[in-house]
Image: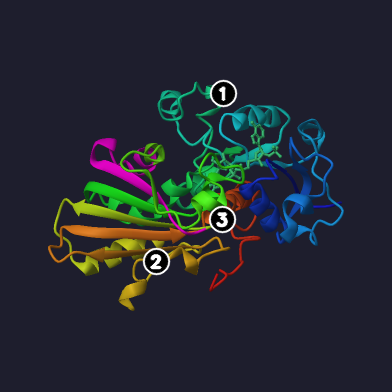
Protein backbone atom coordinates (compact mmCIF):
# COMPACT_ATOMS: atom_id res chain seq x y z
CA UNK A 1 0.00 0.00 0.00
CA UNK A 2 1.25 3.52 -0.83
CA UNK A 3 1.76 5.36 2.47
CA UNK A 4 2.45 8.68 0.76
CA UNK A 5 0.01 11.55 1.29
CA UNK A 6 -2.04 12.07 -1.86
CA UNK A 7 -2.60 15.69 -2.84
CA UNK A 8 -4.29 17.82 -5.46
CA UNK A 9 -3.35 21.36 -6.49
CA UNK A 10 -6.09 23.75 -7.61
CA UNK A 11 -5.28 26.83 -9.70
CA UNK A 12 -2.28 24.79 -10.84
CA UNK A 13 -1.56 26.87 -13.95
CA UNK A 14 -0.80 29.96 -11.86
CA UNK A 15 2.42 31.14 -10.24
CA UNK A 16 1.82 29.78 -6.74
CA UNK A 17 0.23 26.66 -8.25
CA UNK A 18 3.40 26.12 -10.27
CA UNK A 19 5.52 26.68 -7.19
CA UNK A 20 3.49 24.08 -5.29
CA UNK A 21 4.10 21.61 -8.14
CA UNK A 22 7.84 22.37 -7.99
CA UNK A 23 7.95 21.72 -4.25
CA UNK A 24 5.80 18.60 -4.52
CA UNK A 25 8.09 17.23 -7.23
CA UNK A 26 10.80 16.90 -4.57
CA UNK A 27 8.62 16.05 -1.59
CA UNK A 28 9.51 12.69 -0.05
CA UNK A 29 6.07 12.03 1.49
CA UNK A 30 3.55 13.63 -0.85
CA UNK A 31 2.32 12.49 -4.20
CA UNK A 32 0.51 14.64 -6.76
CA UNK A 33 -2.82 13.06 -7.74
CA UNK A 34 -4.23 15.94 -9.74
CA UNK A 35 -3.34 19.44 -10.96
CA UNK A 36 -6.64 21.23 -11.48
CA UNK A 37 -7.23 23.96 -14.05
CA UNK A 38 -10.35 25.54 -15.53
CA UNK A 39 -8.54 26.77 -18.62
CA UNK A 40 -6.09 23.98 -19.42
CA UNK A 41 -7.66 20.62 -18.54
CA UNK A 42 -6.15 18.00 -20.85
CA UNK A 43 -2.99 19.91 -21.67
CA UNK A 44 0.33 18.83 -20.16
CA UNK A 45 1.68 20.48 -17.01
CA UNK A 46 4.79 21.38 -19.01
CA UNK A 47 2.72 23.62 -21.27
CA UNK A 48 2.12 26.06 -18.40
CA UNK A 49 5.30 25.25 -16.46
CA UNK A 50 8.09 24.45 -18.93
CA UNK A 51 10.62 24.14 -16.09
CA UNK A 52 8.65 21.15 -14.76
CA UNK A 53 8.13 19.31 -18.05
CA UNK A 54 10.75 16.67 -17.22
CA UNK A 55 9.28 16.05 -13.75
CA UNK A 56 5.71 15.46 -14.90
CA UNK A 57 6.19 14.26 -18.49
CA UNK A 58 2.96 12.23 -18.59
CA UNK A 59 0.73 14.40 -16.42
CA UNK A 60 -2.00 16.66 -17.79
CA UNK A 61 -4.12 19.20 -15.95
CA UNK A 62 -7.57 17.96 -14.95
CA UNK A 63 -10.88 19.79 -14.74
CA UNK A 64 -12.53 20.85 -11.49
CA UNK A 65 -15.13 18.13 -11.99
CA UNK A 66 -12.34 15.53 -12.15
CA UNK A 67 -10.62 17.23 -9.23
CA UNK A 68 -13.65 16.72 -6.98
CA UNK A 69 -13.78 13.05 -7.96
CA UNK A 70 -10.07 12.46 -7.31
CA UNK A 71 -9.30 10.59 -4.07
CA UNK A 72 -6.87 12.71 -2.08
CA UNK A 73 -5.88 13.28 1.53
CA UNK A 74 -5.18 16.97 1.08
CA UNK A 75 -5.77 19.79 -1.40
CA UNK A 76 -3.76 22.97 -1.92
CA UNK A 77 -5.91 25.80 -3.26
CA UNK A 78 -3.92 28.35 -5.26
CA UNK A 79 -7.07 30.12 -6.44
CA UNK A 80 -8.15 33.75 -6.34
CA UNK A 81 -9.97 34.85 -3.21
CA UNK A 82 -13.69 34.31 -3.26
CA UNK A 83 -13.33 31.32 -5.69
CA UNK A 84 -11.33 29.43 -3.11
CA UNK A 85 -13.81 29.33 -0.23
CA UNK A 86 -16.52 27.45 -2.11
CA UNK A 87 -14.01 24.85 -3.37
CA UNK A 88 -12.62 24.46 0.15
CA UNK A 89 -16.10 23.84 1.53
CA UNK A 90 -16.88 21.13 -1.01
CA UNK A 91 -13.55 19.38 -0.44
CA UNK A 92 -13.90 19.48 3.35
CA UNK A 93 -17.34 17.89 3.00
CA UNK A 94 -15.63 15.06 1.10
CA UNK A 95 -13.14 14.55 3.94
CA UNK A 96 -10.20 16.22 2.20
CA UNK A 97 -7.98 18.48 4.30
CA UNK A 98 -7.44 21.91 2.77
CA UNK A 99 -4.48 24.27 2.74
CA UNK A 100 -5.65 27.45 1.06
CA UNK A 101 -3.33 30.13 -0.31
CA UNK A 102 -5.94 32.80 -0.95
CA UNK A 103 -7.27 35.51 1.33
CA UNK A 104 -10.55 33.69 2.01
CA UNK A 105 -9.68 32.28 5.44
CA UNK A 106 -6.98 34.68 6.63
CA UNK A 107 -9.24 36.99 8.60
CA UNK A 108 -11.20 35.63 11.52
CA UNK A 109 -14.06 38.06 11.13
CA UNK A 110 -16.52 38.07 8.22
CA UNK A 111 -17.06 41.80 8.69
CA UNK A 112 -13.32 42.45 8.35
CA UNK A 113 -13.40 40.39 5.13
CA UNK A 114 -16.29 42.51 3.83
CA UNK A 115 -14.46 45.69 4.70
CA UNK A 116 -11.08 44.77 3.18
CA UNK A 117 -12.19 42.60 0.25
CA UNK A 118 -15.40 44.50 -0.49
CA UNK A 119 -17.53 41.41 -0.81
CA UNK A 120 -19.53 39.20 1.56
CA UNK A 121 -17.62 36.16 2.75
CA UNK A 122 -18.84 33.10 0.79
CA UNK A 123 -18.49 30.62 3.72
CA UNK A 124 -18.33 32.51 7.04
CA UNK A 125 -19.18 29.30 8.92
CA UNK A 126 -15.65 28.02 8.21
CA UNK A 127 -13.78 31.04 9.58
CA UNK A 128 -13.64 29.84 13.17
CA UNK A 129 -11.84 26.62 12.43
CA UNK A 130 -9.36 27.97 9.86
CA UNK A 131 -5.84 28.33 11.27
CA UNK A 132 -3.75 31.25 9.98
CA UNK A 133 -1.11 29.69 7.75
CA UNK A 134 2.19 30.67 9.36
CA UNK A 135 3.62 27.73 11.32
CA UNK A 136 5.94 30.09 13.18
CA UNK A 137 2.82 31.63 14.78
CA UNK A 138 0.32 28.76 14.96
CA UNK A 139 2.24 25.48 14.94
CA UNK A 140 0.33 23.93 17.84
CA UNK A 141 -3.13 24.87 16.53
CA UNK A 142 -2.23 23.34 13.18
CA UNK A 143 -1.79 19.85 14.61
CA UNK A 144 -5.10 18.14 13.96
CA UNK A 145 -6.59 21.03 11.94
CA UNK A 146 -8.36 20.35 8.66
CA UNK A 147 -8.32 23.88 7.21
CA UNK A 148 -5.29 26.18 6.97
CA UNK A 149 -5.54 29.69 5.58
CA UNK A 150 -3.21 31.42 3.19
CA UNK A 151 -1.00 34.29 4.25
CA UNK A 152 -0.69 37.65 2.58
CA UNK A 153 2.88 37.69 1.29
CA UNK A 154 3.41 41.31 2.34
CA UNK A 155 1.76 40.58 5.69
CA UNK A 156 4.08 37.61 6.19
CA UNK A 157 7.12 39.75 5.45
CA UNK A 158 5.96 42.31 8.02
CA UNK A 159 5.24 39.60 10.59
CA UNK A 160 8.80 38.30 10.34
CA UNK A 161 10.23 41.82 10.58
CA UNK A 162 8.09 43.03 13.44
CA UNK A 163 7.04 40.12 15.62
CA UNK A 164 9.95 40.36 18.10
CA UNK A 165 9.13 43.97 19.00
CA UNK A 166 5.36 43.65 18.59
CA UNK A 167 5.21 40.63 20.90
CA UNK A 168 7.16 42.62 23.51
CA UNK A 169 4.59 45.45 23.25
CA UNK A 170 7.23 47.96 22.14
CA UNK A 171 5.57 49.46 19.05
CA UNK A 172 4.33 53.01 19.53
CA UNK A 173 3.74 53.46 15.83
CA UNK A 174 5.02 51.92 12.64
CA UNK A 175 5.40 52.76 8.98
CA UNK A 176 5.78 49.55 6.91
CA UNK A 177 7.43 49.70 3.49
CA UNK A 178 7.37 46.62 1.26
CA UNK A 179 9.29 46.50 -2.01
CA UNK A 180 7.82 43.76 -4.13
CA UNK A 181 8.42 41.80 -7.31
CA UNK A 182 6.02 41.42 -10.22
CA UNK A 183 5.07 37.77 -9.50
CA UNK A 184 3.07 39.07 -6.55
CA UNK A 185 0.27 39.98 -9.00
CA UNK A 186 0.01 36.40 -10.30
CA UNK A 187 0.36 35.01 -13.79
CA UNK A 188 -2.69 36.91 -14.97
CA UNK A 189 -2.04 40.17 -13.16
CA UNK A 190 -4.17 43.15 -13.95
CA UNK A 191 -3.65 46.28 -15.96
CA UNK A 192 -0.07 47.53 -15.82
CA UNK A 193 1.39 44.06 -15.20
CA UNK A 194 2.73 43.43 -18.72
CA UNK A 195 6.48 43.58 -19.21
CA UNK A 196 6.70 46.95 -21.03
CA UNK A 197 4.88 48.66 -18.17
CA UNK A 198 6.09 46.66 -15.22
CA UNK A 199 9.78 46.28 -16.04
CA UNK A 200 11.97 48.96 -14.41
CA UNK A 201 8.95 50.25 -12.53
CA UNK A 202 9.25 52.04 -9.23
CA UNK A 203 5.54 52.16 -8.70
CA UNK A 204 3.97 53.04 -5.38
CA UNK A 205 1.00 50.71 -5.37
CA UNK A 206 -0.42 51.79 -2.01
CA UNK A 207 1.08 54.75 -0.16
CA UNK A 208 -0.62 54.32 3.24
CA UNK A 209 -3.23 51.60 3.48
CA UNK A 210 -2.93 48.01 2.31
CA UNK A 211 -5.43 45.21 2.96
CA UNK A 212 -2.69 43.06 4.48
CA UNK A 213 -2.74 45.45 7.45
CA UNK A 214 -5.82 43.56 8.63
CA UNK A 215 -3.66 40.44 9.05
CA UNK A 216 -1.09 42.42 11.02
CA UNK A 217 -3.68 43.78 13.41
CA UNK A 218 -5.05 40.27 13.85
CA UNK A 219 -1.73 38.44 14.17
CA UNK A 220 0.55 41.01 15.81
CA UNK A 221 -2.04 43.04 17.71
CA UNK A 222 -0.80 46.33 16.20
CA UNK A 223 -3.82 48.65 15.97
CA UNK A 224 -4.60 50.11 12.56
CA UNK A 225 -4.54 53.60 14.12
CA UNK A 226 -0.75 53.40 14.65
CA UNK A 227 0.17 51.68 11.38
CA UNK A 228 0.61 52.69 7.75
CA UNK A 229 1.73 50.33 5.01
CA UNK A 230 3.13 51.22 1.62
CA UNK A 231 3.82 48.72 -1.14
CA UNK A 232 6.16 49.64 -4.00
CA UNK A 233 6.59 47.58 -7.16
CA UNK A 234 10.30 47.38 -7.98
CA UNK A 235 12.52 45.67 -10.55
CA UNK A 236 12.18 42.12 -9.23
CA UNK A 237 10.27 39.07 -10.41
CA UNK A 238 10.30 37.29 -7.07
CA UNK A 239 10.96 38.66 -3.63
CA UNK A 240 9.80 41.10 -0.97
CA UNK A 241 11.93 43.32 1.15
CA UNK A 242 10.06 44.71 4.13
CA UNK A 243 11.47 47.62 6.11
CA UNK A 244 9.25 48.72 8.98
CA UNK A 245 10.16 52.03 10.62
CA UNK A 246 9.14 51.73 14.25
CA UNK A 247 8.87 54.36 16.93
CA UNK A 248 9.49 52.45 20.15
CA UNK A 249 7.59 53.26 23.31
CA UNK A 250 10.72 52.94 25.40
CA UNK A 251 14.44 53.41 24.97
CA UNK A 252 16.27 50.23 24.00
CA UNK A 253 19.86 49.16 23.55
CA UNK A 254 21.02 47.19 20.56
CA UNK A 255 21.68 44.23 22.86
CA UNK A 256 17.99 44.25 23.88
CA UNK A 257 16.96 43.96 20.25
CA UNK A 258 19.39 41.09 19.64
CA UNK A 259 17.84 39.29 22.59
CA UNK A 260 14.30 39.79 21.27
CA UNK A 261 15.13 38.74 17.70
CA UNK A 262 17.07 35.67 18.84
CA UNK A 263 14.29 34.68 21.25
CA UNK A 264 11.67 34.89 18.48
CA UNK A 265 13.61 33.37 15.61
CA UNK A 266 16.51 31.46 17.11
CA UNK A 267 14.61 28.15 17.17
CA UNK A 268 12.99 28.50 13.75
CA UNK A 269 14.62 26.45 11.03
CA UNK A 270 13.50 28.67 8.16
CA UNK A 271 14.15 32.04 9.79
CA UNK A 272 17.48 33.70 10.49
CA UNK A 273 18.64 36.99 11.95
CA UNK A 274 21.16 38.84 9.80
CA UNK A 275 24.45 39.76 11.51
CA UNK A 276 25.22 43.46 12.01
CA UNK A 277 28.21 43.30 9.67
CA UNK A 278 28.81 43.91 6.86
CA UNK A 279 26.56 46.92 7.32
CA UNK A 280 25.24 46.91 3.75
CA UNK A 281 23.74 43.43 4.27
CA UNK A 282 22.22 44.19 7.64
CA UNK A 283 18.83 45.00 6.11
CA UNK A 284 18.33 41.73 4.21
CA UNK A 285 17.97 41.53 0.46
CA UNK A 286 15.47 39.03 -1.03
CA UNK A 287 18.19 37.92 -3.45
CA UNK A 288 19.63 35.84 -0.61
CA UNK A 289 16.52 33.67 -0.24
CA UNK A 290 15.13 33.31 -3.77
CA UNK A 291 13.69 29.89 -4.57
CA UNK A 292 13.88 28.77 -0.94
CA UNK A 293 11.53 28.70 2.02
CA UNK A 294 13.88 30.88 4.05
CA UNK A 295 13.28 34.29 5.61
CA UNK A 296 16.01 36.64 6.70
CA UNK A 297 15.24 39.22 9.35
CA UNK A 298 17.34 42.15 10.50
CA UNK A 299 17.16 45.43 12.35
CA UNK A 300 18.96 48.70 12.92
CA UNK A 301 18.55 51.00 15.89
CA UNK A 302 18.70 54.77 15.41
CA UNK A 303 21.04 56.92 17.49
CA UNK A 304 18.21 58.14 19.72
CA UNK A 305 17.45 54.52 20.72
CA UNK A 306 13.70 55.21 20.30
CA UNK A 307 13.46 54.52 16.57
CA UNK A 308 14.40 51.40 14.68
CA UNK A 309 14.10 49.75 11.29
CA UNK A 310 12.80 46.18 11.49
CA UNK A 311 13.35 44.27 8.28
CA UNK A 312 12.83 40.98 6.49
CA UNK A 313 13.36 39.43 3.09
CA UNK A 314 11.51 36.47 1.64
CA UNK A 315 10.45 34.91 -1.64
CA UNK A 316 6.77 35.76 -2.07
CA UNK A 317 6.06 32.56 -3.99
CA UNK A 318 7.78 30.40 -1.36
CA UNK A 319 7.72 31.53 2.29
CA UNK A 320 5.06 34.07 1.28
CA UNK A 321 2.83 31.38 -0.31
CA UNK A 322 3.67 27.83 -1.46
CA UNK A 323 6.52 27.19 0.99
CA UNK A 324 4.49 28.13 4.06
CA UNK A 325 1.56 26.16 2.63
CA UNK A 326 3.64 22.98 2.33
CA UNK A 327 5.21 23.58 5.76
CA UNK A 328 1.68 23.87 7.23
CA UNK A 329 0.51 20.80 5.29
CA UNK A 330 3.43 18.82 6.71
CA UNK A 331 2.27 19.74 10.21
CA UNK A 332 -1.39 18.86 9.73
CA UNK A 333 -0.44 15.54 8.13
CA UNK A 334 1.95 14.67 10.98
CA UNK A 335 5.10 14.82 8.82
CA UNK A 336 8.44 16.42 9.53
CA UNK A 337 7.67 20.14 9.21
CA UNK A 338 10.57 20.74 6.83
CA UNK A 339 9.90 17.76 4.53
CA UNK A 340 10.36 18.76 0.89
CA UNK A 341 11.52 22.25 1.83
CA UNK A 342 15.27 21.82 2.03
CA UNK A 343 16.02 23.64 -1.22
CA UNK A 344 18.81 26.22 -1.03
CA UNK A 345 18.42 29.78 -2.33
CA UNK A 346 19.64 30.44 -5.86
CA UNK A 347 22.35 33.11 -5.82
CA UNK A 348 23.10 35.23 -7.72
CA UNK A 349 19.77 35.30 -9.51
N1 LIG B 1 1.59 35.58 -6.19
C1 LIG B 1 1.95 35.68 -4.91
O1 LIG B 1 3.05 36.15 -4.60
C2 LIG B 1 1.02 35.21 -3.81
C3 LIG B 1 1.50 35.21 -2.50
C4 LIG B 1 0.66 34.81 -1.45
C5 LIG B 1 -0.64 34.42 -1.74
N2 LIG B 1 -1.09 34.44 -3.03
C6 LIG B 1 -2.47 34.01 -3.27
O2 LIG B 1 -2.45 32.76 -3.96
C7 LIG B 1 -3.58 32.69 -4.84
C8 LIG B 1 -3.06 32.39 -6.24
O3 LIG B 1 -2.19 33.44 -6.61
P1 LIG B 1 -1.28 33.35 -7.91
O4 LIG B 1 -0.34 34.47 -7.82
O5 LIG B 1 -0.78 31.99 -8.11
O6 LIG B 1 -2.38 33.69 -9.02
P2 LIG B 1 -2.38 33.27 -10.55
O7 LIG B 1 -0.99 33.12 -11.04
O8 LIG B 1 -3.29 34.24 -11.23
O9 LIG B 1 -3.07 31.82 -10.55
C9 LIG B 1 -4.37 31.59 -10.08
C10 LIG B 1 -4.95 30.42 -10.89
O10 LIG B 1 -6.30 30.20 -10.46
C11 LIG B 1 -7.12 29.88 -11.58
N3 LIG B 1 -8.29 30.77 -11.55
C12 LIG B 1 -8.33 32.08 -11.87
N4 LIG B 1 -9.57 32.58 -11.68
C13 LIG B 1 -10.31 31.56 -11.21
C14 LIG B 1 -11.66 31.46 -10.82
N5 LIG B 1 -12.48 32.51 -10.83
N6 LIG B 1 -12.09 30.27 -10.40
C15 LIG B 1 -11.28 29.21 -10.36
N7 LIG B 1 -9.98 29.26 -10.75
C16 LIG B 1 -9.51 30.43 -11.15
C17 LIG B 1 -6.34 30.13 -12.83
O11 LIG B 1 -6.08 28.89 -13.43
P3 LIG B 1 -7.09 28.23 -14.47
O12 LIG B 1 -7.86 29.34 -15.14
O13 LIG B 1 -6.20 27.47 -15.37
O14 LIG B 1 -7.96 27.37 -13.62
C18 LIG B 1 -5.02 30.74 -12.37
O15 LIG B 1 -3.90 30.18 -13.04
C19 LIG B 1 -4.29 34.05 -4.75
O16 LIG B 1 -5.40 33.94 -3.91
C20 LIG B 1 -3.24 34.97 -4.14
O17 LIG B 1 -3.80 36.00 -3.37
C21 LIG B 1 -0.29 34.82 -4.06
Dot 3 or dot 2: first in sequence order is 2
Q: Quadrant of the C terminus?
A: bottom right
- State left or right for residue 102 relative to residue 44: left
Q: Which residue is mark 1?
A: 123
Q: Quadrant of ligand 1?
A: top right
Instruction: State the residue at coordinates (61%, 61%).
Output: 341
* Mark-to-mark CA distance, 3 and 1: 27 Å
Residue 108 is a magenta residue:
no
Q: Which residue is mark 2?
A: 284
* Mark-to-mark CA distance, 3 and 2: 16 Å
Image coords of residue 315 (percent x, y): 51, 58
Is residue 314 at all visible to an observer of this figure?
yes
Instruction: State the residue at coordinates (32%, 49%).
Output: 176
In this picture, is 160 found above or below 273? above
Instruction: State the residue at coordinates (78%, 51%).
Output: 47
Residue 222: mark: none
Residue placed most toward the observer, 67 or 52: 52
Q: Secondary structure at mark 1?
A: loop
Q: Which residue is mark 3?
A: 318
Chain part drawn in magenta:
216-236
Residue 12 appears in which quarter of the rendering? top right
Q: Is mark 3 within 8 Å of ligand 1?
A: no
Residue placed most toward the observer, 305 or 231: 231
In this picture, is 268 found above or below 324? below
Residue placed most toward the observer, 44 or 68: 44
Q: Are marks 2 and 1 in contact (CB under 8 Å)?
A: no
Dot 3 or dot 1: first in sequence order is 1
- Is the residue marked by circle 2 packed among few (<14), some (14-19), or many (20+) residues within 10 Å? many
* Mark-to-mark CA distance, 2 and 1: 38 Å
Amino acid sequence: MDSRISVTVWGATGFTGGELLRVLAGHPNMELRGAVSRSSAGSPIGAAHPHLRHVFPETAFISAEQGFKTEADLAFLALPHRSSAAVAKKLLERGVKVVDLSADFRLKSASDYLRWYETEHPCPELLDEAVYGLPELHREEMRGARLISGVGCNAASAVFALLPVARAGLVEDVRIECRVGSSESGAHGGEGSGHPLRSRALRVVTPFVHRHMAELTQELGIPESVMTMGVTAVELVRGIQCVAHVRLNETLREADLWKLYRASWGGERFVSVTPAKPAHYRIPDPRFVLGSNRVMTGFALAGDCRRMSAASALDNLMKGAAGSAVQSANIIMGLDESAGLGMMPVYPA
